[in-house]
Amino acid sequence: MKNLLVCTLSVMLIVGCKGSNKAIENGVEQPIVISNIEKTPELTAELKAQETIDDQFRLLYERFEPMLDRSDSLTGTDANNDGIRDDIEAFIDALEVTEPVRKALKQNARYTQENLYHDFSQKTHANIKKALEISYKYDEVLACKEFVGIPVRDITNTGQIIRALTYNTKARTMAYVAYNHLQDGSVSTSLKAEEKYCE
């Protein structure tokens, strides 16, 4: 668990240390709202040529990293209120994958984002209970990803990259750390790869 946390935090800090994505409007910095990534025939062909979903994410990150939301808001912009930050949803929508796989990745992104809607800075019984409730949803994410046919290595790697994209600022990373600490000593059980775990 500690090695995974250190690895995840390292990736998040690298992702989060890039420049700002704010535009200046009337002398005031405004976050750039990302709603989609233009899928040119060239980009589509390059994505299709990648061996894994993780490789597709990496290609998109290399091309569109400046589009990521690095606003001061923990949750960022979610114009359609589906629980997924718009820029991350744009990355997932740009992938060349089947719709069931896309839905499973969005479920992963929604779970990863959920803890940012709560204040986990205090170690209270209510916060521990809520943190565990959210964390158990990840077991369902893993079962769903397996059910839709994502290979094991890609299940892990796509989860890590979604986590890195989500916690891409210091404030988001610190919120994740607070949430994660409330789960110390907890265990989870692998679920069978069944459709009922897919949203």
Image (tube, rainbow, N blue to C red):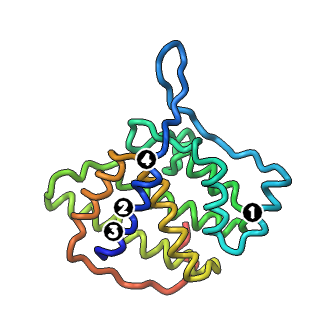
Q: Residues within 10 Å of mark 1 (few under 14, many from 20)?
A: many
Q: In the rendered image, which residue does mark 3 sit on? A: 5
Q: In the rendered image, which residue does mark 1 sit on? A: 47
Q: Viewer-proximal residue, 24 or 74?
A: 24
Disc 2 to disc 3, C-alpha distance: 6 Å
Disc 3 to disc 1, C-alpha distance: 29 Å
Q: Amino acid at mark 1?
A: Leu
Q: In the rendered image, which residue does mark 2 sit on? A: 9
Residue 11, quarter of the rendered image: bottom left
Q: Give the mark nearest the N terminus, 4 or 1.
A: 4
Q: Give the mark nearest the N terminus, 3 or 1.
A: 3
Disc 2 to disc 4, C-alpha distance: 12 Å
**Residue at position x 65%, y 55% in the image:** 60
Q: In the rendered image, which residue does mark 4 sit on? A: 17
Find out whether the residues at labels 2 and 3 contact each other: C-beta distance under 8 Å: yes
Disc 4 to disc 1, C-alpha distance: 26 Å
| Residue 13 to residue 161: above or below | above
The residue positioned farthest toward the right in the image shown: 41
| For residue 73, side relative to residue 158 (left or right) | left
| Residue 147 to residue 126: above or below | below
**Residue at position x 14%, y 58% in the image:** 123
| For residue 151, side relative to residue 114 (left or right) | right
Q: Amino acid at mark 4?
A: Cys
